[in-house]
Image (cartoon, grey):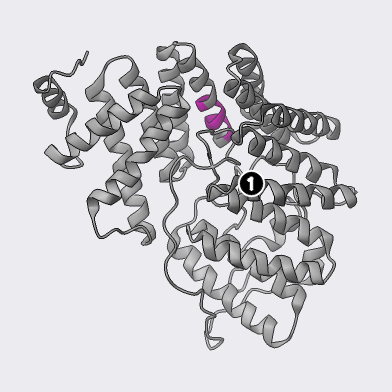
Amino acid sequence: MQSCLYHQAEAESGRLYEPGKGHYGVSLHGFPTPLGQGSHQGESHTEAFSSPSVPNREPAIASSASAKPVPSVTSEQSGRESLGTGSGELSHSAVPQVSPSQLQATLKMFQQALAIAQAKNNRINQVNILKRIGIIHCKLGEHAWGIKCLKQALQLAQALRHPVSVGVILNYLGAAYRQTGQEHKALRVYLRALDIVKGIGNEAGVALLLNHLGAVYNSLGQSDQALSCSRQALETFHGLGNAPDGEATALHNIGEIYLQMRRYRQALAFLEQALAIEQKIGNRKGEAKVLESIATVYVRINQERQALELYQQALEIRREVGDSPNVEARCFDYIGAIYYKIGNRSCALWHHLQALGMLQAHNYAFGSDRFLDDTVAIAKLLQNLVAVYDRLGLPSQGMTCYQQALDIIGTFGENACEEAIHNFLEQEGIKNS
């Protein structure tokens, strides 16, 4: 059986090189993953928040005159590449957050490496370097360029008839499509990857892709297909006996599917199993994701106090592990939505404004989500709030809260305190506990 598609090859060739030490110690395993269609099962789902817009620039090839060493990717590393067993399509729970400046510096070094590989007509290195450049662009929110580079890597890998590389690249490409809301394209890509991985006998890779397919089918509303894929993934991971992270993701996916089907008892049963595994293996990010899903179930069955406690636990974990601002902001939005549902409008709106501030700071830090009109930017980011309410089954409340948030911002700006919001709502005659 082929080695698993992340833990071996990506552990070696997926990290960036460090001067004098052989690697930079900056992992390329993952960029923020989708929550698409309002789901947040595992971080292999589309993030609830829109990604920074793509800068209007070509990823230029850096000059080879730089004194820094250039990373190289060998054919031996390529041969050890594997899909792995984890939940994240392009991420791993142990991977630290990487700053945009670090990613930009790494991107330049891989662009140098690509220029050298092209000059030497080393197509194997070109495949691996283009793949890594594509991943970095996606991590930077530049998904159009990321997808373009991944497609170029895919074409070369296909020409070289290297099925392992083709499977790995298709896996990354599927994640990129999911991040940009292109679920149907992701579905086609994952199905192609599944055929390839089955052909090379990689059971762990098959299970991983079945998990991804389950998530995609669920986001497309095809619950029966989603459940079938996720159950097959769970059975395969269980048979492998050494993939608790994969089992946890499969259980989480199944719980999310039952949640979408409004079968809340079954959803809780599977989510609680997933939570127990994540806690046992010490996957704090995975634990936070499952806690959020369980909290969502409690909102749906009108147990808001329990939901609020679980979302707050998840937020504490997100902060503890240094999760991305987008994910932390999503937690604030969910907490705000619960306060809104129980009638505490001022506290709800304050939490939503906190989330908005985090998203703005994050996007400005990336330098790629600037708008000529701040009102347009605020409205775009507040759309995430509407998606959160949809996720919780509160669409009408979401639209009302969206308009009230705009009114608050128009009156006080983006940093209104809870007391000011409370007084404003009272003047407007809006019920507030």
Please determine whether, in this image, residue 76 is positioned above or below residue 427.
Answer: below
Callout count = 1
Q: In the image, is residue 291 part of the stretch drawn in magenta?
A: yes
Q: Give the percent coordinates (x, y) of residue 46.
A: 54, 42
Q: Which residues are magenta?
A: 286-292
Please determine whether, in this image, residue 14 is positioned above or below residue 331.
Answer: below
Along the line of sight, the residue nearer the viewer: 62 or 370: 370
Question: Is 181 positioned to the left or the right of 353 in the image?
Answer: right
Based on the displayed image, in which of its 4 quarters is residue 294 positioned?
top right
> Dividing the image into 4 quarters, which one contains the C terminus?
top left
Based on the displayed image, in which of its 4 quarters is residue 319 positioned?
top left
Question: Is 410 positioned to the left or the right of 382 in the image?
Answer: left
Q: Give the residue type that dot 1 points to.
A: His
Along the line of sight, the residue nearer the viewer: 363 or 429: 429
Residue depicted at 26% across the width and 18% down the height: 344
Based on the displayed image, in which of its 4 quarters is residue 119 positioned?
bottom right
Q: Which residue is mark 1?
A: 184
Q: Residues within 10 Å of mark 1 (few under 14, many from 20)?
A: some
Please determine whether, in this image, residue 118 is positioned above or below residue 342.
Answer: below
The answer to whether one can see residue 283 in this image is no
Instruction: Label 1, secondary structure: give it.
Output: helix
Q: Give the percent coordinates (x, y) of residue 260.
A: 58, 24
What's the magenta bit mostly, secondary-structure-wise?
helix
The answer to whether one can see residue 79 in this image is yes
Q: Give the percent coordinates (x, y) of residue 181.
A: 54, 47
Residue depicted at 66% across the width and 60% down the height: 14
Q: In the image, is residue 389 part of the stretch drawn in magenta?
A: no
Please determine whether, in this image, residue 124 is positioned above or below residue 289.
Answer: below
Residue depicted at 18% across the width and 34% down the height: 408
